[in-house]
Image (cartoon, rainbow, N blue to C red):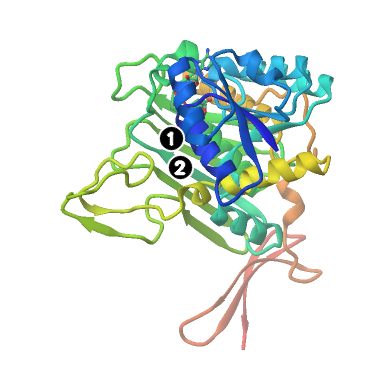
């Protein structure tokens, strides 16, 4: 694939490291940055033939086959509309829009233009996530009841994130978008998110948007998604998931503790890992950030799908659903009540209720619980289907 990279900042560089790494056949052929100097430096480092400060010039460049939007949130829509105009396949980093309205306009535009669209949510492509998700799809955890995802760090690295008019919001939008999509993936992306309850506050930073929030997302099948996000967490980038199902549990520590512990007095040390706050003392480096953060698997899915005329696992529609959930969260933080998730279009299942799932023991009883006691007796707790009475049965 020949790619235009719009944005040469933090994520543009991570993406390009992933796309061009390991003898890859994919190549960034045009880069666009706000300042010519930055575009030139990027072009030199990554051996990119064409650089510019003009978004449309990069998109319409004849060598460009696919556009990767790594621009601040307020420029996503403009870039997507230009991709529609020039009929170029487009991949957009998270969050798709600053709100669901923007995201929906982008969704409608790419579908009307008939162009390939991918939503670059890397955290549903990490090796640990892919393994957990596969086990869940194979039934290892049974029906998913609760999926919690946490992303907290000491705050973003560029000015525009902190300015609500450009970014669209605080940590709910910036980090909650990851957590919501992660929980959707575990619960099932075909299960409709119904309503959201959220607490948010600006606890530390002198900004208009929230810097800390916790939210609950209720799904139609009774499952609950939970997100915990903060721009005020000290100690690095904390990415953790906890998933509970009727048959099992999975806990993932995605980044801060990946199994590598290192101590240094600080002599000769430099970059440790994303948002790491220290390069002395005990540290938790990440061996291969591009892979651990899902970028490699994500671009493989995007480009394989594009080449084979398929949709990738993450599309603009997913980005739109995420924005709609987060809009409800922001409303709930204001109103302090459960707020409905307002989806103009729902493409998953409907009418999936938790009542479908009662487990029968036999014709007379439902099974409540089975336990082997420490004194060697197996006990069954049963509920009579007709009378509703709870009884205990000893099985020798
Ligand atoms: N894990 C992830 O998926 C992840 C991580 C970080 C950021 N992001 C997303 O990536 C996007 C960019 O974030 P970032 O961290 O790379 O920001 P950044 O500030 O590091 O980089 C932004 C880039 O956009 C360019 N730019 C800004 N205005 C421009 C204009 N008018 N014309 C052309 N170029 C312009 C800048 O020159 C810079 O190269 C955001 O949407 C952010 O949410 C995603």
Decide: few, some or many residues near mark 2? Use Cα within 10 Å; few <14, some 14-19, many ≥20. Answer: many
Residue at the image point whose x is 38% and y is 18% from the top: 159
- In this view, the residue in front, 175 or 75, is 75
In the displayed orientation, state which residue is furthest to the top: 165
Of labels 2 and 1, earlier in sequence is 2
Give the side of residue 99 with respect to residue 190, left or right.
left
- In the rendered view, would you say 8 is above or below 389? above
Check whether the beta carbons of the residues at disc 2 and disc 1 lie within 8 A of each other: yes
Where does the N terminus fall, quadrant-wise?
Answer: top right
Q: Does residue 261 appear to the left or right of 345 in the view shown?
A: left
The image quadrant of residue 134 is bottom right
Q: Position of residue 179 (x, y in %)?
A: 53, 39
Residue 165 screen position, x and y as percent: 48, 10
* Left or right, residue 119 beside residue 172: right
Where residue 277 sits, quadrant-wise, is top left
Is 130 or 199 nearer to us in this picture?
A: 130
Separation of marks 2 and 1 at Cα, in angstroms: 6 Å
**Horizontal arrangement in the rendering, residue 95 relative to residue 109 (left or right):** left
- In-front residue for pair 80/252: 80
Q: Where 65 sits versus 302, above or below? A: above
Q: Is mark 1 within 8 Å of ligand 1?
A: no
The residue that label 2 is drawn on is 150
According to the image, label 1 marks what residue?
229
How many neighbours does mark 1 have within 10 angstroms: few (below 14), some (14-19), or many (20 or more)?
many
Q: Position of residue 60 (x, y in %)?
A: 71, 18
Instruction: Tell me the SS state at disc 1.
Output: strand
Question: Residue 52 sits in which quadrant?
Answer: top right
Query: What secondary structure is found at the residue carrying circle 2?
Result: strand
């Amino acid at each position: 694939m020949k790619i235009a990279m719009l944005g040469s900042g933090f994520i543009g560089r991570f993406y390009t490291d992933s796309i061009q790494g390991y003898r890859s056949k994919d190549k960034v052929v045009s880069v666009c940055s706000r300042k010519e100097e930055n575009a030139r430096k990027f072009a030199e480092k990554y051996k990119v033939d064409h650089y510019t400060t003009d978004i449309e010039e990069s998109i319409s460049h004849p060598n460009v086959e696919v556009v990767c939007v790594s621009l601040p949130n307020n420029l996503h829509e403009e870039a997507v509309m230009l991709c529609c105009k020039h009929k170029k396949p487009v991949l957009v980093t998270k969050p798709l829009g600053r709100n669901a309205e923007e995201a929906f306009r982008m969704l409608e535009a790419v579908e009307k233009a008939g162009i390939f669209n991918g939503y670059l949510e890397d955290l549903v492509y990490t090796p640990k996530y892919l393994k957990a998700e596969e086990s869940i799809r194979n039934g290892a955890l049974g029906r998913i009841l609760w999926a919690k995802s946490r992303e907290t760090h000491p705050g973003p690295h560029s000015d525009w994130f902190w300015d609500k008019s450009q970014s669209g919001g605080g940590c709910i939008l910036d980090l909650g978008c990851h957590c919501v999509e992660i929980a959707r993936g575990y619960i099932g992306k075909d299960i409709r998110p119904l309503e959201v309850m959220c607490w948010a506050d600006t606890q530390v930073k002198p900004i208009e948007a929230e810097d800390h929030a916790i939210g609950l997302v209720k799904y139609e099948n009774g499952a609950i998604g939970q997100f915990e996000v903060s721009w005020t967490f000290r100690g690095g980038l904390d990415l953790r998931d906890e998933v509970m199902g009727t048959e099992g549990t999975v806990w993932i520590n995605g980044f801060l503790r990946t199994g590598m512990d290192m101590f240094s007095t600080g002599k000769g040390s430099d970059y440790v890992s994303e948002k790491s706050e220290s390069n002395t003392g005990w540290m938790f480096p990440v061996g291969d950030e591009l892979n651990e953060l899902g970028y490699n698997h994500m671009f493989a899915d995007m480009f394989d799908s594009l080449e084979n005329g398929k949709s990738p696992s993450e599309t603009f529609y997913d980005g739109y659903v995420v924005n709609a959930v987060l809009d409800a969260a922001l409303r709930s933080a204001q109103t302090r009540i459960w707020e409905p998730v307002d989806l103009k279009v729902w493409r998953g299942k409907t009418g999936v209720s938790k009542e479908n799932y009662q487990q029968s023991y036999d014709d007379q009883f439902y099974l409540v619980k089975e336990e082997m006691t420490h004194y060697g007796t197996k006990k069954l707790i049963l509920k009579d289907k007709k009378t509703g009475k709870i009884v205990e049965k000893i099985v020798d």
